[in-house]
Image (tube, rainbow, N blue to C red):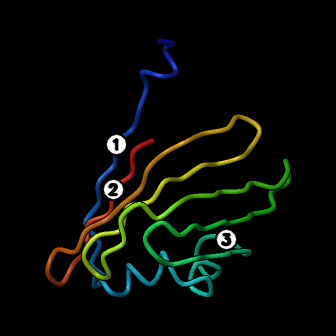
Amino acid sequence: MSNHELESIDVTRTLTETPDRVFDAWINPALLQQWLAPKAEVDAREGGYFRLEVAKPEGVHVVTGKYQEFKRNERLVMTWGLRRPNGGRSRHGGIAKGRTSEAWFKH
């Protein structure tokens, strides 16, 4: 195993937004375009996909992923494949916590 394969970053954050607003922010193309990527395609369902595209001076960054778990306002787990000059793969997800939400990222 290479050193690159052994390295990972885990981040968990509690968000003050309600689970329904956070969930919508990750599955609604119009909302994704407002905060994350100017171009967004989404098939919002378990087993569905998403594709995000951002133009940067160094080129176009494309993120594709699959919704692995999709329980409305309870749990959303997705893969995250980033196509850019140095590549990258990660997994993102979140769970509802009463009136707040918890988001986690593993890269």
Specify few, some or many for label 3: CA neighbours under 10 Å numbering under 14, 14-19, or 20 or more. Answer: some
Kind of residue indicated by mark 3: Ala
**Tag 3 near tag 2, CB within 8 Å:** no
Q: CA distance from mark 1 to mark 3?
A: 23 Å
Residue at image location 81% in from the left, 55% down from the top: 60
Specify few, some or many for label 2: CA neighbours under 10 Å numbering under 14, 14-19, or 20 or more. Answer: some
Sequence-first disc among 3 and 2: 3
Image quadrant holding the C terminus, namely top left
Residue at image location 63% in from the left, 58% down from the top: 64
Residue at image location 30% in from the left, 76% down from the top: 71
Q: Does dot 2 land on a helix, a strand or a loop?
A: strand
Sequence-first disc among 2 and 1: 1
* Lateral position of residue 31 relative to residue 85, left or right: left
Q: Does dot 1 land on a helix, a strand or a loop?
A: strand
* Lateral position of residue 77 relative to residue 60, left or right: left
**Tag 2 near tag 1, CB within 8 Å:** yes
Q: Position of residue 78 (x, y in %)?
A: 45, 59
* Lateral position of residue 66 relative to residue 99, left or right: right
Q: CA distance from mark 3 to mark 2?
A: 19 Å
**Looking at the image, is 97 positioned above or below residue 13?**
below
User: Quick one: 92 or 71, which is closer to the camera?
Assistant: 71
* Lateral position of residue 97 relative to residue 23, left or right: left
Q: Which residue is mark 1?
A: 10
Q: Which residue is mark 3?
A: 37
Kind of residue indicated by mark 1: Asp
Specify few, some or many for label 1: CA neighbours under 10 Å numbering under 14, 14-19, or 20 or more. Answer: few
Q: Which residue is mark 2?
A: 104
Sequence-first disc among 1 and 3: 1
Q: Position of residue 98 (x, y in %)?
A: 14, 81
